[in-house]
Amino acid sequence: MLNAREIIDIYISFFEKRGHKRIENSPIVPQNDPTTLFTSSGMQPLVPYFLGELHPMGKRLVNVQNCFRAQDVDEVGDNRHITFFRMLGNWSLGDYFKSEQIPWFFEFLTKGLGLPTNKLYVSVFKGFDDIPKDEESAKIWKNLFENAGINSQNRIFYYGPKQNWWSRSGIPKDMPIGEPGGPDSEVFFDLGIEHDKKYGERCHINCDCEKFLEIGNSVFMEYKKIRNNDFEKLSQKNVDFGGGLERLLAAIENKSDIFQTSLFSPIIKAIENETGKKYEDHKKEMRIMTDHFIASTFITASNITPSNKEQGYILRRLIRRGFDNFYQIGGKEITSIIESIIGQYKETDPDLDQKFENIKNTILEEEQSYLTTREKAKILIEKKYKIGDELKGVSTISSDDAFLLYSTHGLSPTQIKSLGYEFNEQEFAKKMEEHQKLSRAGAQKKFKGGLIDNSEMSIKYHTATHLLHAALRKILGSHVEQKGSNITVERLRFDFSHSEKLTDEEIRQIEDLINEKINENLPVTFEIVDKEEALKSGALGFFTEKYADKVKVYIINGFSKEICGGPHVDFTGKLKRFTIIKQENIGHGQRRIYAKLEN
């Protein structure tokens, strides 16, 4: 029976034989996409190429991408939801479309992986407003089933945009202007579970009874939102396929519970050994622990540490929720479980083994921080409810105090209850809802733009980053190397190696040089060359991501030459004027610059 590594190898080989080039797994923490905290799908780094930008590896691409979806945290605990997963992906950037993609995926499932055809079911798009019903995909699936000797009746289901439309932002009404998306066709595997009629008299592939497991989704990305619910056709038709490795493994092993597959079961066994408890008696707790500590391992390996902001906050939440469930079933020492996780993943992600000590220490340090936080919270409550010099045994606290523990100390309602406190949950929920509204509003403002959306200002800022990098090296010296950047529609942020604070004169010189190049209206061009050739020619490439064999090099005539995916403006004059607004010391011999362009 195939294991996870073998599924990856078969998939990559299958599509390489059909003209696809393998691209690198992008970092799980995106380098230059302020619209999101984590890479949540294989297509996420490819958005510019769906919109027409040329990819250096061509029009047919394939890879396996490490993904994390924070929105699934609260779903973990059932038989299929996980926050960290590996996504198998293949893409056509204006090349092939439905008539190639659907038969290829069917062949991969039935011949490549050996899945029984009679266990496969599919869904297609039933149409929405001016976007038509996907009769073409349905006809292709019908022919495939019937040619395999399977009656296609009751095997092809039609759904609306809630189930069978895909974009990074979800359903059409939630998509921002300029966002690409399209109808999709999903494939489901029948796990053989008896239908539970509490979910309805009749079962269907999107039924909540968990009889069917989605194992792959072909998105036919041919639309772009232009206003309200209006869409226009993209300049090219694209295919964006994603299939969860963990779910495909469950289908191959015919497991109705993905945590009982060969990938997860050794980790579950390590938890059983450490806690002395059986999985059958504590499924939810062990599923949460397994998922959260796997996700924490990969996020920590990406050089994120627990904190109260952004990725660090998500990591802290994962680790603490994992420990809540660990303590609940009698766990004491987590090291053997971390060792088991790395043992299961090191074949596909060898850097985990090299970073084991850092991963382990980060998780253990956060455990100590969490225990200290819990103790401080308990002391705070006990002091507040003290009568005279005697501490009153507190079992019920006010919703205000419960919310204080949440907002100030970061304790969730479950964690507060684990300390032995009860409160008025309805009042707490109201306060939580108001707090979340404010948080969402702040997040929407923070993540409202970025290079990934291909907006005009984002493209300008991306080009300005190249000018800034070149100017810093010319004014400060060739020791300057780019260490990171973050672009929104309002400003750019640029991190670079330099140990001293920039003087006012240096800032003025940098600004003057950049604005000189803007005023010269230099052409911005690109070439696609071999990686080694690009580096030998003097092209800069200091980002930490791995480069493919072929790279795109952007050239600002006589001034800048960098390896970069793009896109950029075609002439520097479109940037108008560049101003540095702030500099910061970020430690480790690095500085950070914030800058703006004139609108």
Image (cartoon, grey):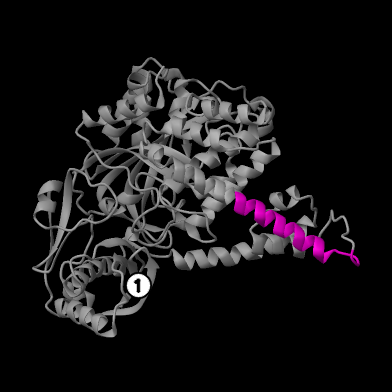
**Residue 566: x percent and y percent?**
23, 58
**Badge 1: residue crowd in 10 Å (few <14, some 14–19, many ≥20):** some
- Residues rendered magenta in the picture: 368-389
Residue nearer the viewer, 192 or 463:
463
Q: Secondary structure at mark 1?
A: loop
149 up-or-down from 518: above or below: above
Query: Which quarter of the rendered picture does the N terminus lie within?
Result: top left
201 up-or-down from 399: above or below: above
* Residue hosting label 1: 491
Q: Quadrant of residue 402?
A: bottom right
For the point 46% across and 51% down, which residue is it? Answer: 170
Residue nearer the viewer, 473 or 469:
473
Q: Quadrant of residue 242?
A: top left
Q: Is residue 372 magenta?
A: yes
**Residue 77: x percent and y percent?**
61, 37
Looking at numbered disc 1 in the image, what kind of residue is underneath it?
Arg
For the point 53% across and 46% down, which residue is it? Answer: 363
Residue 598 appears anywhere in the view: no
- Left or right: where 233 falls relative to 196: left
Query: Which quarter of the rendered picture does the C terminus lie within?
Result: bottom left
